[in-house]
Amino acid sequence: MLLQIMEEPELPILLVNYVGGALGVLDAHVPFLKKHFHLITMKEFLESKEYFSAKVKAIYVWWHKPVIDGELLKSLPNLKVIANSGGGMDHLDLKLISSFGVKMANAPYGVSTSTADIGMALLLTAARKLVEGCQIAVSPDTEHLPINWLADDISGATLGIIGMGSIGYKVAQRARAFEMKILYHNRNQRKEDEELAVGACYCQKIDDLLQQSDFVMLAVKLTPQTYKLIGKRELELMKSTATLINISRGWS
């Protein structure tokens, strides 16, 4: 690898944890990355640290690796940018990174659609008892299904969305197709045309949303304000028959 880099035309060096496997950078991403960078892994970096230290210009963080700490940052004097593969950066010490003059990049909307899909899938699974139904269906002891196994309708039910950002709004778009009534609580109220497009009503107080909703979906990012957002008091405000669905993200 070292000889190859010395012989090829100069490209900025990108440090990654490793490629492939369960937690490595996806093989499908490699051709695109190699158009713009020479890729080196942490193993290669550590084996030739003296050579690479001043040459690494960027780090691509995948599955929270490599770990970005003071020791690594001190060893990369010409590092310009760290790119995080997902939207969440809770696992990164942004103040520390900034103190080294390094810029951060992330992909905040990369999985908004997929996450909203999962949110609706979880809602439907809970309402229709799909997991339990599957277990009963495949059990050799099952002779029949109870006549009431269709469980709860979601059409006409009230969905309360806590966090009406990109993901929350996409959930509302999907819920509207299921003819659900939509309430939402957010730091800021959406524009009127955005509310009308999905039939959503704004709840300034989260308590009002909790008391009225048949399904409550959390779609917030982890911040000091959202930490422990739902606790015993909030659960007691909800209907006894309500379902709580959490598609929020955060690093713990």
Image (cartoon, rainbow, N blue to C red):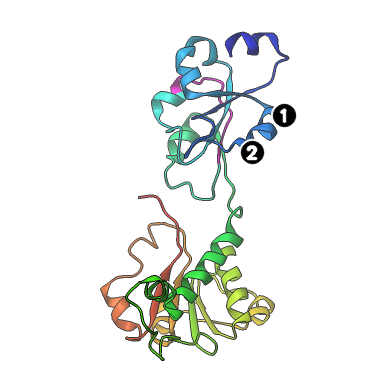
Q: Give the percent coordinates (x, y) of residue 11.
A: 69, 20
Q: Nearer the viewer, residue 5 or 96?
A: 5
Q: Which residue is mark 2?
A: 28
> Residue at the spot x=54%, y=47% of the render?
86
**In this orientation, does residue 205 appear?**
no
Classify the position of the N terminus by image quarter. Answer: top right
Name the spot of residue 60 as percent of width and height, x first.
Answer: 55, 34
Q: Is residue 77 magenta?
A: yes
Q: Quadrant of residue 176?
A: bottom right
Task: Tell me the CA gap for discs 1 and 2.
Answer: 13 Å
Q: Amino acid at mark 2?
A: Ala
* Residue 160 belongs to the span the image colors magenta: no
Judge depth for marks 1 and 2 and give the one in front.
2
Marker count (numbered): 2
The image position of residue 10, as x and y in percent, is 70, 16
The answer to whether residue 184 of the structure is visible from this angle is yes
Is residue 194 toward the left or the right of residue 58 in the image? right
Q: Amino acid at mark 1?
A: Lys
Q: Which residues are magenta?
A: 74-84
Relative to 91, does residue 228 appear above or below in the rendering? below
Where does label 1 land, which residue?
A: 35
